[in-house]
Amino acid sequence: MDDRSIEEILDTIGDQHARHVLAAISREQKSAKELAEECDMSLPTVYRRIEMLTEYDLITEQTLVADDGNHYKVYESNFESTVISLQDDEYRVRIYREENLPDRFSQLWDDLRAE
């Protein structure tokens, strides 16, 4: 991650509204309307935070179909934890994601073949 990306992700995580959205979807997936109600935010504010969090791959979206046939999106957290450290006058951000074993093995195999 370059310095600009680290600063931007720190700004994103530092945003109070973004943290509220992340906390709300860490328990279960929710629609933007549900997030607005639970977090006491306007829909435009929720959508701006969703855009910010999606840009850094911190949330994922899924399209669902309601009983009446209308489509809507739900959002969920895309990571288990984040560690921010300061080492040698430099910030480092590490995002831990939940991966299943076959995906991890495939990534390891691809990494070994690249060397």
Image (cartoon, grey):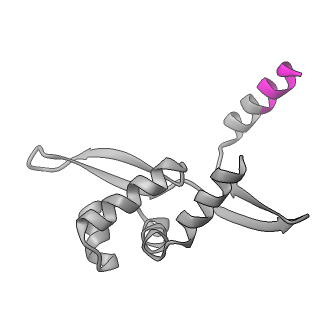
Q: Tell me residue 113's x, y (percent).
A: 84, 19
Total numbered circles: 0
- Is residue 54 or residue 91 the one in the foreground? 91
As drawn, which residue projects farthest toward the bottom? 40
In the image: residue 58, left or right of residue 1: left
The residue under the point 46% across, 68% down is 18
Q: Is residue 11 above or below residue 71?
A: below
Magenta part of the protein: which range? 108-115
In the image: residue 72, left or right of residue 29: left
The residue under the point 65% across, 46% down is 99
Quarter in which the C terminus is drawn: top right
- Is residue 95 or residue 6 the one in the foreground? 6
Q: Is residue 102 visible?
A: yes
- Is residue 101 or residue 84 the one in the foreground? 84
Determine if the magenta segment contains residue 39.
no
Quarter of the figure with residue 42: bottom left
Q: Tell me residue 86's x, y (percent).
A: 82, 68
Q: Is residue 97 visible?
A: no
* Majority secondary structure of magenta residues: helix
In the image: residue 46, left or right of residue 67: right
The residue under the point 65% across, 43% down is 100
The residue under the point 30% across, 44% down is 63
As drawn, which residue projects farthest toward the left? 68
Q: Tell me residue 91's x, y (percent).
A: 77, 63
Q: Is residue 114 above or below residue 16?
A: above
Determine if the magenta segment contains residue 112.
yes
